[in-house]
Image (tube, grey):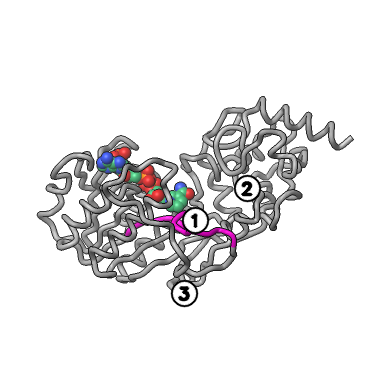
Amino acid sequence: MANILILGGTAWLGRTLAAQAMEAGHAVTCLARGKSGDFPKGMAAIEVDRDGDGAYAGAVSQQWDLVVELTRMPAHARAAVEALSPRARHWIFVSSCSVYADHSTPEVPEEAELLEPLESTETYTPELYGQAKSGCEWLAMATRGNAALVVRPGLIGGPGDPSGRTTYWPLRLADPRGPVLVPLDDGSAYRQHVQLIDVRDLAAFILDAGLAGRTGAVNAVGQAVPLQDALLAAREAAHANPQIVPYRLSTMVADGVSPWSGPRSLPLVLPLEADYAGFARRSDARALEWGLERRPLEETFRDIIACEEPWAGRQLGAGLSAADEGQLIDIARSKAV
Ligand SMILES: NC(=O)c1ccc[n+]([C@@H]2O[C@H](COP(=O)([O-])OP(=O)(O)OC[C@H]3O[C@@H](n4cnc5c(N)ncnc54)[C@H](OP(=O)(O)O)[C@@H]3O)[C@@H](O)[C@H]2O)c1
């Protein structure tokens, strides 16, 4: 049994990781404010705001076999690793593929150039996410003399995705009401792909790699599949045969439709420029060598449909509202005539 500290644990991935670790018989402590969600039941909790002084005082009295850090704030990353590194046998920083400086080339390995690290004294804003994660990586590695593991997930998906990016298509395709607007990849400077890792597979990988004492950086990504195949997997998971209205991505900009996320967006669709040709085609070679196991995409989509509320025209964190979809269907049909 390992003694595991999760710096987080009240949000999606951290909570999944905490549950899996507890199920495997480990002792788990979560350190957070309890704002993103409740502390997971049956585990020790250190309720604290990391913006305050002495935030780690409740954790320094123990010896940790594994610390898993989920932050995006270099100031938090610095204070935590400085306070707790002497108490930690192994350290994992959950980073992101957003740390890479370039997204234009498929299959580049983990040694590719990173964004300039955001300093721990600089203010974090969501626009600086990639730089901030790069800064957090640097702090973990530098403080621990490279004896740390940096896990870089790509798009995380599955039941409970708070962003709505990976739940939109299966839920929409399972909704029996009306035709469904589905993207047709005719406008990209490259072939659009989807590379989604199920949150449960990611959590298992982080735990296994951490307990095995792995060090260095690793991309933790799903299998890259063409966008059309991912949408087909969502249709098959939905067990429905809705009327499909193809929507040409070449008209996206003119129609005021965004790729990826946010309101009036097409989730899983990337920007059309060649700069994104490698974004959903990261190298997974190292993760597979280390034993990453991934369930089929269709299974992830099936579980989303089983676990989530039906779409029923509501606005998720990403995707089209019923009104926007109806308007775009009219546009698509008028162009098809
Ligand atoms: N979603 C994706 O597709 C994707 C892709 C690549 C990488 N990632 C990375 O994957 C991880 C996802 O983690 P997650 O789902 O567990 O969600 P998260 O929102 O990134 O987790 C942040 C955790 O930090 C805690 N926290 C935030 N501010 C705090 C403060 N001032 N004091 C104490 N605790 C604080 C939050 O808890 P409280 O609010 O309760 O305090 C929460 O438990 C992140 O590292 C993210 O960057 C995500």
Judging by the rendered image, the residue that carries numbered circle 2 is 271
- Dot 2 amino acid type: Pro
As for residue 96 lying within the magenta part, the answer is: yes
Q: Which of marks 2 and 1 is nearer the N terminus?
A: 1
From the Cβ of disc 2, is ligand 1 less than 8 Å away? no
| Residue at 47% in and 67% down | 112
Q: Which of marks 2 and 3 is in front?
A: 2
Q: Assess disc 3: are there few (<14), some (14-19) or many (≥20) residues with their C-alpha within 10 Å of its C-alpha.
A: few
Q: In which quarter of the image is residue 282?
A: bottom right
Q: Which of marks 3 and 1 is nearer the N terminus?
A: 1
Q: Distance between the residues labelled 2 and 3?
A: 31 Å
Picture coordinates of residue 327 (x, y %)? 73, 27
> Where is 133 relative to 291, above or below?
above
Q: Residue 177 vs residue 218: left or right?
A: right
Q: Residue 302 vs residue 160: left or right?
A: right
- Dot 1 amino acid type: Gly
| Residue at 55% in and 43% down | 165
From the Cβ of disc 1, is ligand 1 less than 8 Å away? yes
Q: Assess disc 2: are there few (<14), some (14-19) or many (≥20) residues with their C-alpha within 10 Å of its C-alpha.
A: many
Picture coordinates of residue 236 (x, y %)? 68, 49
Residue 154: give its label. 1
| Residue at 76% in and 32% down | 329
Question: Magenta span covers which residues?
Answer: 93-104
As for residue 293 lying within the magenta part, the answer is: no
Q: In which quarter of the image is the C terminus?
A: top right
Q: Distance between the residues labelled 2 and 1?
A: 16 Å
Which type of secondary structure does the marked residue at label 2 adopt?
Answer: loop
> Where is 74 relative to 87, above or below?
above
- Dot 3 amino acid type: Glu
Judging by the rendered image, the residue that carries numbered circle 3 is 289
